Image: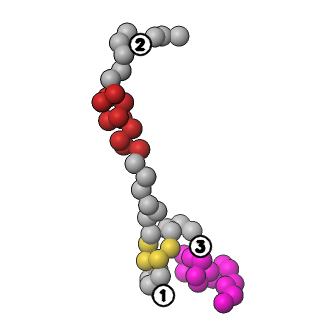
Amino acid sequence: MGQPKRKQSKQRSRKRRGADVFHGPQLARDPTTGSLAVPHHVNPETGMYRGRQVLTVED
């Protein structure tokens, strides 16, 4: 297995790790109710997915 020829600096390692910052979930607004939900998932508040009722939501 190959070995590095030189020690990798702290700055170089930290630059690479700086791209791994946590990002919050992207939310899309539901056109019918205006509530926020994760795209391509069933809306937990309404039970709708792509304009169809797929879950029965109990209050």
- Residue 55 in picture, x, y percent from top left: 68, 80
- Mark 3 or mark 2, earlier in chain: 2
Disc sitting over residue 33 in the figure: 1
Q: CA distance from mark 3 to mark 2?
A: 48 Å
Tell me which secondary structure the magenta stretch mostly adopts: loop
Q: Pick the residue in front: 36 or 21.
A: 21
Disc sitting over residue 4 in the figure: 2
The disc labelled 2 sits on which kind of residue?
Pro
Q: Is residue 49 magenta?
A: yes
- Residue 58 in picture, x, y percent from top left: 69, 87
* Left or right side of 4 for 54: right
> Would residue 24 be seen by someone viewing this image from the given angle?
yes
Q: CA distance from mark 1 to mark 2?
A: 57 Å
Q: Residue at x 69, y 84 (%)?
A: 56
Q: Residue at x 57, y 68 (%)?
A: 41
- Mark 1 or mark 3, earlier in chain: 1
Q: Secondary structure at mark 3?
A: loop
Extent of the magenta region? 42-59
* Comparing labels 1 and 2, the label whose residue is closer to the camera: 2
The disc labelled 1 sits on which kind of residue?
Thr
Q: How many marks?
A: 3
- Residue 33 in picture, x, y percent from top left: 48, 87
Q: Residues within 10 Å of mark 3 (few under 14, many from 20)?
A: some
- Residue 59 in picture, x, y percent from top left: 66, 90
The disc labelled 3 sits on which kind of residue?
Val
Q: Pick the residue in front: 14 or 46.
A: 14
> Quadrant location of residue 29?
bottom left
What residue is pinned by disc 3?
Answer: 42
